[in-house]
Amino acid sequence: MKLAIISDIHANYEALDAVLKDIETQRVEQILCLGDIVGYGPDPSKCVTAIQALGCPVIRGNHDHDAANDRALDNLNDTARLSLEWTRKQLSQAQRQWLGNLPFSRRVGRFAISHASLDEPEAWHYIRDLADAERALNRQNVPLCFIGHTHQPGFFEQKGGVTHQIRKAGHQLDDDTKVLVNVGSVGQPRDGDMRASYVIFDRVQRTVEFQRVEYEVAKTQERIRGQGLPEELAIRLTYAA
Ligand code: ZN
């Protein structure tokens, strides 16, 4: 009874394809997608089509949200703004509508999924450190929540009112603990490891396993340059920060 949980694909089709192939070897019952399918990367339309083809639960990320609407993007840095303006033109009207109708968060059985913090998912709060995690866990009304958004895999648990950060796992979840798992990013990792990141959650064993998958980074970088997207977006895939 395993689930694969993916997030922050960011229009990196090579990374998504490698992750989906890896998931095929894992015998999972379901895939869940935590959003940011698009933004930054060179293949937004292809990635949306690939995620739609999975027919799996999907929630909305901030880049999906902004690719779907027409708001002015002046609160974003140049790189994010340029890539989103370009992304809007790459997507069909139907794809933009689909992205804009995705839920911000949802329950799946006994746990929840959200792109950013679960208590106000549409505000896109980042959970970066112990203080952020403590605030989120205090308000978390389910024992387990999977998120993305920071592109940094890892997890936080709260037991007896005390919050800890746990960096390494295959980890067994306790019944009396509230847990927040960040599954990392498929298409733009930021934890110094350029390999695509995702999580396998075993519902019966109650274990969380972080997976890393190699993909053709150079091919995605070539596509980014070929589309005239900012060079920083290509370089970032190698230094993964
Ligand atoms: Zn993201």
Image (cartoon, rainbow, N blue to C red):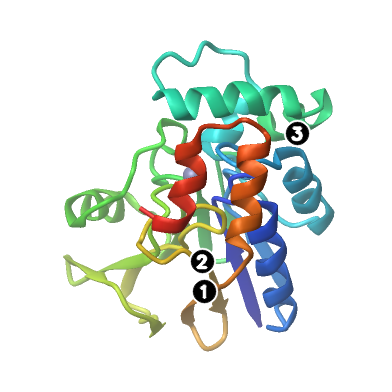
Q: Is mark 3 within 8 Å of ligand 1?
A: no
What secondary structure is marked by label 3? helix
Q: Does any portion of residue 179 appear in the rendered image?
A: no
Left or right of residue 59: residue 235: left
Instruction: Tell which circle, 3 or 2, labels the residue nearer the N-terminal end.
Output: 3
Task: Write the residue at 68% across / 76% down.
Answer: 22
Residue positioned 52% across, 76% down in the render: 211
Q: Nearer the viewer, residue 15 or 163?
A: 15
Q: Earlier in the sequence, mark 1 or mark 2?
A: 2
**Residue 29 has which mark?**
none
Instruction: Please state the horizontal and vertical placement of residue 206, each as a whole percent of the image.
Output: 48, 83
Q: Counting other residues with Cα less than 10 Å from the Cα at mark 2, is it few (<14), some (14-19), or many (20 or more)?
A: many
Whole-percent x, y for residue 25 in the image: 72, 83
Q: Nearer the viewer, residue 24 or 156?
A: 24
Q: CB atoms at circles 3 and 2 under 8 Å apart?
A: no
Amino acid at dot 2: Ser
Give the residue at x 62% y 14%.
70
Label drawn at residue 212: 1
153 over 36 or under it: above or below:
below
Which amino acid does the dot numbered 1 rest on? Arg
In the rendered image, residue 87, in percent from the top left (x then y), is placed at: 66, 29
Crowd class of label 1 (few under 14; some 14 to 19; many from 20; radius 10 Å) = some
- The mark lying in front, picked from 3 and 1, is 1
Verify CB contact (< 8 Å) between mark 1 and mark 2.
yes
Image quadrant containing the N terminus: bottom right
Q: CA distance from mark 1 to mark 2?
A: 5 Å
- The residue that disc 3 covers is 98
Mark pair 3, 2: CA separation: 25 Å
Asked if residue 53 shows in the view, the reply is: yes
Please tell me which of labels 3 and 1 falls first in the chain.
3
Q: Which residue is mark 2?
A: 197
* Element on which disc 2 rests: strand
